[in-house]
Amino acid sequence: MPAMRPLPLLVAALLGACAAIPPTPTNDPVLQPLGHGLWLLPGRFPRDRQPDGNSLVLEGQTGLVLVDSGRHAEHSQALLDFAARRGRPITHVVNTHWHLDHLGGNARLRDALPGLEVIGSPAVARAVGERFATFRRDLEGMLADPKTTADVREMIRVDLALYDRAAALVPTRSIDGPPQALSLAGRELTIGHETAASDGDLWIFDRASGVLAVGDLVTLPVPFLDTACPARWREALGRIDALPFGRLLPGHGPVMDRSTWRRWRAGFDALLDCAASDAPARTCSARWIEDLGPLLAPPEHAVAHGMIGHYFAQRLRAPDRDRFCSAAGA
Ligand SMILES: [Zn+2]
């Protein structure tokens, strides 16, 4: 593994944790009803592949709104198949941020739906225009390294194919600034913008159901800190807590109620406090696992140790830990 700039796709973290990730589920992606005209397509995070983020489908009077489009073809195809079965058009996609596990499906959706409106933060176009070429070079370097394993090579090829379609990933409409009310396909939403897990994260609050989709502002088994601004992320979670949601959909992991959310948030605060102390990283990851309790199944404990150890070295205790705290971050 080269000493690298943070890749926005968890390759580096996975290299530290792959061996411990549970075996791949072989079933096809299946959407789960959440009531109130909402469905969840859970993002998968198997051993031999990079993750897909969760996708949320919201049904309005005039069509379907998606939150995030996944990375792999199976994920976006499952969304298209669902829309076909419902007999409703997908009219909008809102991307919570620019990581490929939430954005990569845009190209496939657009191929099928040429009039699709795609909403994202300004950071999406910035990442595509300024960062993707560098990430691509890093991946090509890993591909050229004979020590790179076959599993990782396959992960890299999936992402290189998405970088080939970069122009089809960018939004048609950008949102930032204070939270704003929007009606999409007849669904009444509030969309907010934060700098937290990336330099431009959107959250989407569905007022009818009380469901709040936050992308990678909340993830399991650990916070994904590859392109994070940790201090601003902590502040953003305070603003999230003030929203009147009943259920919260993380970017990775199952739907949370309020008490589960509070447990996760307390764990996040403790993790950042621990990172700022002299405690060894392993002590801090053990505390994270203890704080999250039933939110982490025992097979995920080793993954959490591996990923947090990586993030301590590469982000939380790195000299350039604040590099993603402004739009100018590399
Ligand atoms: Zn993600």
Image (tube, rainbow, N blue to C red):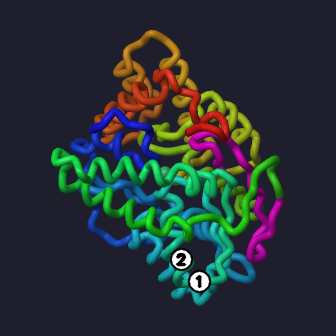
Which sits in the foreground, 283 or 209?
283
Is the residue indicated by label 2 positioned so its CB lies within 8 Å of ligand 1?
no
Q: Nearer the viewer, residue 60 or 179?
A: 179
Mark 1 to mark 2: distance in Å?
6 Å
Residue drawn at point x = 73 percent, y = 83 percent? 62
Determine the image quadrant of residue 88. bottom right
Does residue 175 lie above or below 292 as drawn? below
Position in image of residue 295 (x %, y %): 44, 41
Q: Which residue is mark 2?
A: 109
Q: Residue 213, image x and y in percent?
A: 63, 55
Query: CB of mark 1 within 8 Å of CB of mark 2?
Result: yes
- Give the percent coordinates (x, y) of residue 117: 68, 74
Residue 166 shows in the view: yes
Expressed as whole percent of the image width and height from the top left, the position of residue 12 reads: 35, 41
Q: Residue at x 59, y 47 (%)?
A: 257
Residue 185 is a magenta residue: yes
**What residue sits right under mark 1 in the picture?**
113
Point out the stretch of residues depicted in magenta. 181-203
**Farthest residue toward the top?**
278
